[in-house]
Amino acid sequence: MDGSSTTSRSDNEGDYPMYSSDEEGDAQYWTDRRGSAVFNQIARDEPDMQKLTLWTYSPKPISPDAWIGLGANIGKHSYLKELEVRMDGLDYEVDEIGTTEHLEAFCVALAHNRSLQKLFIEELDCRRARLDTLRPLLVQNENLKNLQLHSCKLGPNDFRMLSDAFRQRKRPCSITSLAFTSDTDAPISDESVPAFLEMTTIITNLKELDLSYNNIGIGGCNELVPLLQNRDSKLKRLYLDENPIGDEGAQILANAMVHNETLKELAIGGSRSNVTRAGCDAFFRILCNTSNIN
């Protein structure tokens, strides 16, 4: 191990989840013996393990005991800084670890962690497993800076829970980056925008917000106006790619940025955005007036 990442995949037995590093990704395969070694390394709380990516996909089913045990060992780990849990490919109707009981048991165990700076979770179905099971980590882990939930089927109540958890943090301003993206059949809609924007009033040092690949439209753009007009906002990057905002939504966002001197990057591209030359022109007019923005 080089101190920056961990690589392993369990191909044979399927008793251990699959592992990989950001350096090797899917290109590197290991035997089950290696997967077991990594599992044991996590349990030993070794300081050279700082980044870890888990896949729930495996040629053979992952045992619930191994899955929950892994969550417990990560929860106790003192040095792990970045964790990605990728549940894409998990069959909730077939895989044992996809039951509400086992998903929540993994999250409850994981929530004891206090070292993570970045937590990425993909395709945790929050309609099956309560996001509230992660509350202890969200409230008490003062190191957490970056939270990314991708395709987790989040609803307004989930965002209210997150806001409540962040409100209980001693230093809510330690959170600087949030991502709630989706490519599933349950994207974030205009209805949820007020609920997650409440978090921006609590996390006063938020610098990056990614809402790409959702179903945010004109109504959601109107809800975003106060955030863009807030002179105390620290937000530098806002990603709205692949949201059906259309030209009218683009015009709303452009007008809201007239006096914004903080935002450096706003992304509204993608085939689903429905933004034409007319919507782009609204931003060109703002950009050409250098007295309006930084």
Image (cartoon, rainbow, N blue to C red):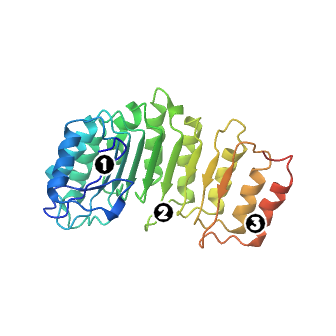
Pick out the residue farthest to the front: 2
> Does residue 63 appear in the picture of this structure?
no
Q: How many marks?
A: 3
The residue that mark 2 highlights is 187
Give the label on residue 280, or none: 3
- On screen, residue 189 above or below 112: below
Q: Is mark 2 on a helix, strand or loop?
A: loop
Residue 168 falls in image quadrant: top left
Dot in front, 1 or 2: 1
Q: Disc 1 marks which residue?
A: 6
Q: Nearer the viewer, mark 3 or mark 2?
A: 3
Label 3 Cα crowd, 10 Å radius (few <14 / some 14-19 / many 20+): some
In the picture, the quarter occupied by the C terminus is top right
Q: Which of 46 and 206 is in front in this view?
A: 46
Q: Position of residue 112 (x, y in %)?
A: 29, 35
State the image coordinates of residue 157 (x, y, percent, origin top left).
44, 49
Place of residue 144 in the rendered image (x, y in percent of width and height, measured from the top left): 43, 37
Report helix, strand or loop for mark 3. Answer: helix
Is 76 above or below relative to 104?
above
Bin the neighbour count of mark 2 within 10 Å (Cα to Cα): few under 14, some 14-19, many 20 and up.
many
Instruction: Look at label 1 and name its amino acid.
Output: Thr
- Tell which of 106 and 225 is nearer to you: 106
